[in-house]
Structure formats: C-alpha cells, structure tokens
Image (cartoon, rainbow, N blue to C red):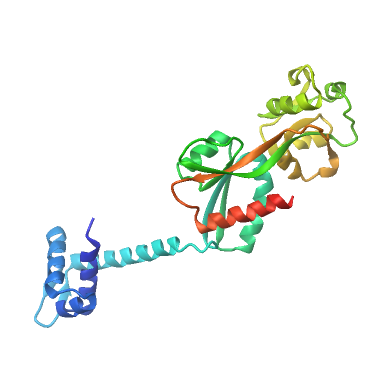
Amino acid sequence: MLNPQWLRSFAMLAQAGSFTAAADELKLTQAAVSQHIRHLEDALGPLLIRRPRALELTPAGKALLEYCAEMERANERLHARLADDGEVGTVGLITPGSIGLFLYPRLLDLQAMTPGLVIRHRFAPDAEVLEAVLHNRFEIGLVMLKPDDPRLTASAFSEEPLELVYPAGERIDSWQDLERMGFMDHPDGKAMASRLLSRHFPGNPGVQTLPCRGFSNQVGLMLEPVARGFGFTVIPRYARQAFANQEAIEVVQCNVPVVDTLWLIHRAEWPLSPRAARVVEYLRRQVKAV
C-alpha cells in the first residue's frame, strides 16, 4: 500500500505546479516533498516531466492523480459513516419469529419517520441469531436464552408469556376439551405446550397423547387453522398479538403463567452505532406500550 503522506504530496504538487508551492501548502520542506515523489517513482515509475517553468504528468502520473482523488472520496465516505447521527444508514436486526412478527411493522413505522434509515430484519432461531451477531452479519439480535459468551453483551429486552389459543366460541374447561379439539403443532409447539399445560392442567397425560390436527413451520401462520376451528395451539404472546383476525380466537387465562425473557444482544467489544441505539430505544418503547 502506498504511503498516504506520499500521495498527499503528489496530489498537492500536481495542483500547485511546483515543489516550492506544494511544500508551502503542506507545511513541509521542499526536500521532504521531493523525497516523497522519489519514493512513488521508485514504486510506480516516472510520474512527472520536470520542465523549467512547469511540471507535466506522465500517463502513470495521471493515473496516480485519479487514484488520489478516489482515495479522498473514500476517506470522505468513511468519515461520513463514522459521523453517524442515528438517522442515516442500515441497521441489521435478527430475531425469533414471534417477537419479529410484532416488531417488524413497528420498524417500518420508524423507517417511514426516518427516510434515511434502512431496516434489515431476519427471522431465525437462537443459534442462528448468536452466530449472525458474533460474525457481524447483524449488529443486534434477540434471543430466548441469555448467552454466556464474553464477546456478547446481553440485556433484558422484554418478557413474553406463552398462551393457549383456541377457536372463538369453543370452551376449554378440562383436558377432555383439548382431546376433543386437537392440537395444531409447530416446530416448538410440543415443547411450549408441555411447559404451559403442566401448569394449567397438573398431572395431565402429556401433549403427545392429544390428536394432532396439523402442522406448520411458520409461526406467523399458526393461528390461521386455529381461527378456522381446526384445533388449539400454544404460542408466544407476541405471535398472537400480531395475528390480524383476533375476533376468531380466544386465549385461556392461566393462573400460573409461563413467561420467557427475551435478551437483546450485540458485540461487547464496541458500542452500538448511533442508528442501532436509536432503533433499540424506539423498540423498547414499543414493547413497553403493549
């Protein structure tokens, strides 16, 4: 890589037209500027034709001057990015499906209010969230289990209860009602149902004994068959709140709820960018308002 000071000397020399004028502008000695040009010519070949009253750039010199201009523009872009004011640039957020369904429309609201902000969001399970943040593919993430990796900072973001959701107009008073209705499963369905049903129906024979009426791997679609009367399911509250057809479903009120903590994570070695910090502050207000 070429020495930046040599490049500054060459660019000023091309602009000023003489070694004396260039040295004055750079507040260097003429000998220092000459030495810088000599180093560049040792590396790149002849750059200047020295005439009594003027300097003329060789083809290599013209190419180097264009390179200097490109480096200056790159330097300006770098400083612009580092001078992040929280309103311009891209923010990457990766989350589990349930909370993502709740947050994404609100992120779009923020983007509409801040046209210079670009939101990049991805749904992913905990393991993928951790890996993406650790490898800097996303600046911030949300996970269900607090990580113990020293490279990550984790702070409590929100609490999310599990909910037993069933078709509107049905009744759930006993385990027999669940057997009659049947279970709509999803990738975490049986695990979530086991945790919640053990609280609501102590001593039950287990979710595996219930008839399975269907399966979907998309948490955002899980309440569609429930709303159509095909069975009940157990999902996190944020997924239920994101469902559009609320009048078609009901939620069992559990006296002993199962509540998970969602953890906000980012790399511990450096602070959040101002724009990411702005997104986090905005989202914390959104979840508190629910």
Question: Is 289 located above or below residue 98 in the figure?
Answer: below
Question: Is 171 located above or below residue 288 in the figure?
Answer: above
| Quadrant in which the N terminus is drawn | bottom left
Question: Is 210 located above or below residue 230 in the figure?
Answer: above
Tell me which residue sits at (70%, 51%) in the image. Answer: 288
Q: Position of residue 205 (x, y in %)?
A: 78, 16
Q: Quadrant of residue 179?
A: top right
Q: Nearer the viewer, residue 145 or 103?
A: 145
Question: Is 16 located above or below residue 236 in the figure?
Answer: below
Q: Quadrant of residue 285?
A: bottom right
Q: Nearer the viewer, residue 41 or 271?
A: 271
How many marks overall? 0
Residue furthest left in the image:
52
User: Horizontally, is 91 left or right of 100 in the view?
Assistant: left
User: Horizontally, is 262 left or right of 210 in the view?
Assistant: left
Q: Position of residue 70 (x, y in %)?
A: 32, 64
User: Horizontally, is 88 left or right of 53 in the view?
Assistant: right
Q: Position of residue 261 (x, y in %)?
A: 65, 39
Residue furthest bottom in the image:
53
Q: Nearer the viewer, residue 288 or 182?
A: 288
Q: Position of residue 215 (x, y in %)?
A: 71, 28
Tell me which residue sits at (33%, 66%) in the image. Answer: 72
Tell me which residue sits at (56%, 59%) in the image. Answer: 117
User: Horizontally, is 190 left or right of 273 in the view?
Assistant: right
